[in-house]
């Protein structure tokens, strides 16, 4: 199953993750500018080691970070002890049952290209409050990845940009 492959890959990555370098760090300020200055509830999909969740915690009452990788979630919990307003869960966003209209903002960095976009957006539409913000940063470099990802678990690289998709 594709979720098991991705879970295993990111469990291995978690063993080598260093907070001093993360290939997504340079997107954080831009993404934060897309969000309201204060939110009640924020969902961080594919939160990894929780770096962006910790930034979100400075402007939200509650942050929920979810990731398929138990190793990533364990590291996130360890690094976020000073942030009591963050909760982390090992979860598959496509199988997870949301409370209807519970989030003011939903963010995802470099995760959606692993998922069937249409299913994901329908799930997120259910979870997002009216007027809420959905901020997605899709991984780039598709021309390099095309040959490696044309089939199998990572085939969603190169699909139409999420910014041009409507739920």
Image (spheres, grey):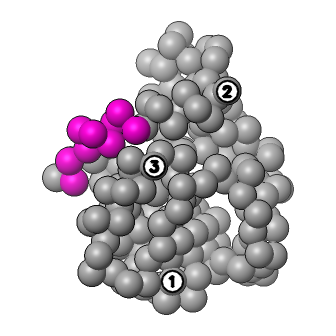
For label 3, the SS is: helix
Mostly what secondary structure, the magenta segment? helix
Q: How many marks?
A: 3
Name the residue carrying label 2: 1
Q: Is residue 164 visible?
A: no
- The stretch of residues the image draws in magenta is 11-19
Q: Within the magenta stretch, is there residue 17? A: yes
Label 3 or label 1, whichever lies nearer to me, is 3
Callout 1 crowding tier (Cα within 10 Å): few <14, some 14–19, many ≥20: many
Nearer-N-terminus badge (3/1) = 1
Does 48 sit left or right of 157 as displayed?
left
Compared with residue 144, is residue 14 higher up or lower down, i.e. above or below?
A: below
Q: Tell me which residue sits at (82%, 56%) in the image.
A: 122
Name the residue carrying label 3: 70
For label 1, the SS is: strand
Question: Percent x, y for residue 68?
Answer: 54, 47
Label 1 or label 2, whichever lies nearer to me, is 2
Q: Tell me which residue sits at (78%, 58%) in the image.
A: 123
């Amino acid at each position: 199953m594709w979720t098991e492959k991705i879970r295993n890959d990111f469990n291995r990555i978690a063993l080598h993750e260093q907070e001093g370098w993360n290939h997504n760090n340079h997107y954080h300020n831009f993404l934060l500018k897309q969000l309201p200055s204060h939110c009640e509830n924020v969902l961080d999909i594919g939160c990894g080691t929780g770096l962006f969740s910790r930034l979100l915690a400075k402007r939200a009452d509650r942050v929920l970070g979810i990731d398929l990788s138990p190793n990533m979630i364990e590291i996130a919990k360890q690094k976020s002890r000073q942030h009591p307003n963050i909760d982390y869960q090992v979860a598959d966003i496509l199988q997870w049952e949301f409370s209807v209209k519970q989030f003011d903002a939903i963010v995802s960095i470099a995760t959606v290209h692993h998922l069937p976009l249409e299913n994901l957006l329908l799930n997120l539409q259910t979870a997002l409050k009216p007027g809420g913000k959905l901020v997605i940063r899709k991984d780039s470099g598709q021309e390099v990845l095309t040959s490696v990802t044309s089939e199998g678990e990572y085939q969603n690289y190169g699909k139409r940009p999420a910014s041009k998709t409507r739920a």
